[in-house]
Amino acid sequence: MKLVISTIGPDRVGLVEAISKVINDCNCNIEDSKMAVFCGEFAAIFLVAGSEQALATLERRSDELRQHGLTVFIRKPSDRPRGEPTIPYRITASSLDHPGIVYRITRTLAEAGINIEAMETKHYYAPTSGAPMFRFEADISVPTHVNLPRLRAHLQQIGEEENIDIELSSN
């Protein structure tokens, strides 16, 4: 059995230890997680496995996490319907930062029926010029019916229109 736990709250040293301690004390196991700090706010999501009794105990003890200033959301993962076979790909894009980059790329993916499995974006400043830059990285699941040359052409068109370097590579 599994639970998905997501948390957000003011960052401080020891939050991951506090969360993992409660999970461990309930005889549960962290199978997967993602964590980040944004402007002083800690955000994390955990996939936790355990027996039905252990997960029920963990849900009851979630107030211990709230005592650390965290907002906590817990839910049972929904069953994912089996769709057609997919192929894992990675898409990366970088350019001078400007509004609409994420929207243009993700709209193209959604229109093609491509699911985003993981995504990370980063705003940073170019080392030499100090220009504001943007980087987009995503792991995607491409259904086998998707015409890859057409997808690449569409992404290339976006790149030319928006001055974005976009790469699509197999994982």
Image (cartoon, rainbow, N blue to C red):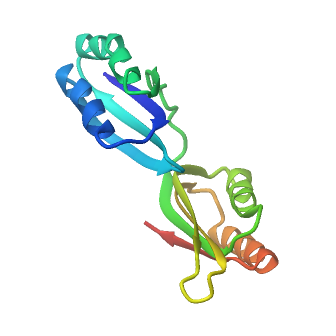
The image position of residue 99, as x and y in percent, is: 77, 62
| Location of residue 164 with respect to 79 vertically, above or below | below
Q: Residue at x 37, y 27 (%)?
A: 68
Q: Residue at x 72, y 64 (%)?
A: 101
Q: How many marks?
A: 0
Q: Residue at x 52, y 32 (%)?
A: 81
Q: Residue furthest right?
A: 161
| Location of residue 78 with respect to 145 vertically, above or below | above
The one nearer the camera, 62 or 130, is 130
49 relative to 93 in the view: left or right: left
The image position of residue 38, as x and y in percent, is: 52, 50
The image position of residue 6, as x and y in percent, is: 45, 31
The one nearer the camera, 169 or 163, is 163
The one nearer the camera, 9 or 165, is 9
| Location of residue 45 with respect to 153 vertically, above or below | above
The image position of residue 49, as x and y in percent, is: 28, 27
| Location of residue 147 with respect to 82 vertically, above or below | below
The one nearer the camera, 115 or 121, is 121
Q: Residue at x 21, y 19 (%)?
A: 26
The C terminus - image quarter: bottom left
The N terminus - image quarter: top left
